[in-house]
Image (cartoon, grey):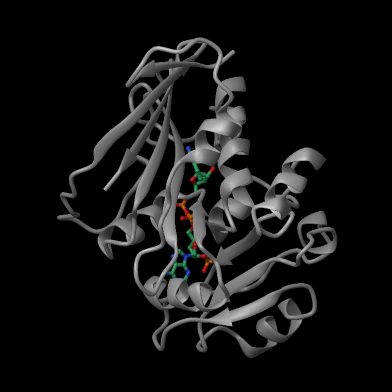
Amino acid sequence: LVRQVWPESLEDVDPVALYGADDRPPPPGRPWVLVDMVASADGGTTIGDASGGLGGAGDRAVFGALRAAADVILVGAATVRADRYGPVRLPEHQQAARIERGQTPLPRLAIVTRNPTFDLATPLFTDSRPAPLIITTATASPAARVEAADRADLLLAGHGDSVDLGAALAALAEMEVGVVLCEGGPTLVGQLAEADLLDELCLTIEPVLLAGGSSRIAKGPSPGVEQRLQLRRILEAEGALFLRYTR
Ligand SMILES: NC(=O)c1ccc[n+]([C@@H]2O[C@H](COP(=O)([O-])OP(=O)(O)OC[C@H]3O[C@@H](n4cnc5c(N)ncnc54)[C@H](OP(=O)(O)O)[C@@H]3O)[C@@H](O)[C@H]2O)c1
């Protein structure tokens, strides 16, 4: 059971309806970029090497609600590997609602990598409809690119060794992508923040203390950035908080 705490108190809200109704106007030349992350009360982001054990039922509900709203799910290759990403799935009625809104039935997964080497026999690559998009660079190994192109579509973005995220987002806009949901990890989120490409942050805070050395939700070379966020909504379920911020 998810309730809204702020701006007004509401018992038993439907995350799919709430997050689906939020306004996400694409800025000029790129899609709206929304980041969804879960952290412990002390800011940790992984248990073991994965984030899967961290989020509770409420987090899974919000995670699904955001996927239901997105056109593309952008994710770093390390997260795809650590969290064992599979094909994106949504209930039939949510797929129908997406079609009615003019979206594809399912959001497409887009993986950012310098090294497009994945186990292409896993369901992520054999069962995803549409096939995943791999966003990489012209400097990536040609052999790996050819192999990956068998099971995914490749998008080359930028001229250096790293994907230029601004160029990647511009290319997505040209593919009529309106809302990009970034599911991490912290390295990718840090780069979006550094490049000032983040429009919305949906942060789950789980009532758990982790200590240890896991990353914050965004990381990168210091000194980092200082960007003001505006708090838009607070939901709560079983002690977990779901904060929605926009820039
Ligand atoms: N708590 C949460 O909400 C949450 C969410 C997501 C992930 N996580 C956790 O975070 C950890 C992974 O995060 P991470 O920060 O280490 O990695 P990440 O951001 O998931 O992925 C980093 C990788 O993405 C690729 N990449 C990133 N930026 C790139 C660029 N500009 N150009 C080309 N490739 C780029 C590179 O892949 P290649 O090495 O293939 O070149 C890089 O090694 C995992 O433990 C995961 O469980 C937690």
Q: Residue at x 49, y 73 (%)?
A: 173
Note whether residue 56 is visible.
no
Note whether residue 95 is visible.
yes
Measured from the top left, where is residue 232 in percent x and y?
32, 33
Q: How many marks?
A: 0
Using the image as rendered, state which of residue 1 and residue 76 is in the foreground: 1
Q: Residue at x 64, y 89 (%)?
A: 142
Measured from the top left, where is residue 14 in percent x and y?
59, 24
Q: Residue at x 47, y 42 (%)?
A: 36
Question: In the picture, residue 192 is in which quadrant?
Answer: bottom left
Q: Residue at x 61, y 28 (%)?
A: 61
Question: In the picture, residue 56 is in which quadrant?
Answer: top right
* Residue reaching furthest to the front: 100
Question: In the picture, residue 196 is in which quadrant?
Answer: bottom left
Measured from the top left, where is residue 205 in percent x and y?
41, 25
Using the image as rendered, state which of residue 38 and residue 121 is in the foreground: 38
The N terminus: image quadrant: top right
Q: Is residue 233 above or below residue 238?
A: below
Measured from the top left, where is residue 214 in percent x and y?
40, 37
Q: Is residue 212 above or below residue 222?
A: above
Q: Is residue 133 above or below residue 141?
A: above
Instruction: Classify residue 156 as left or right of residue 229.
Output: right
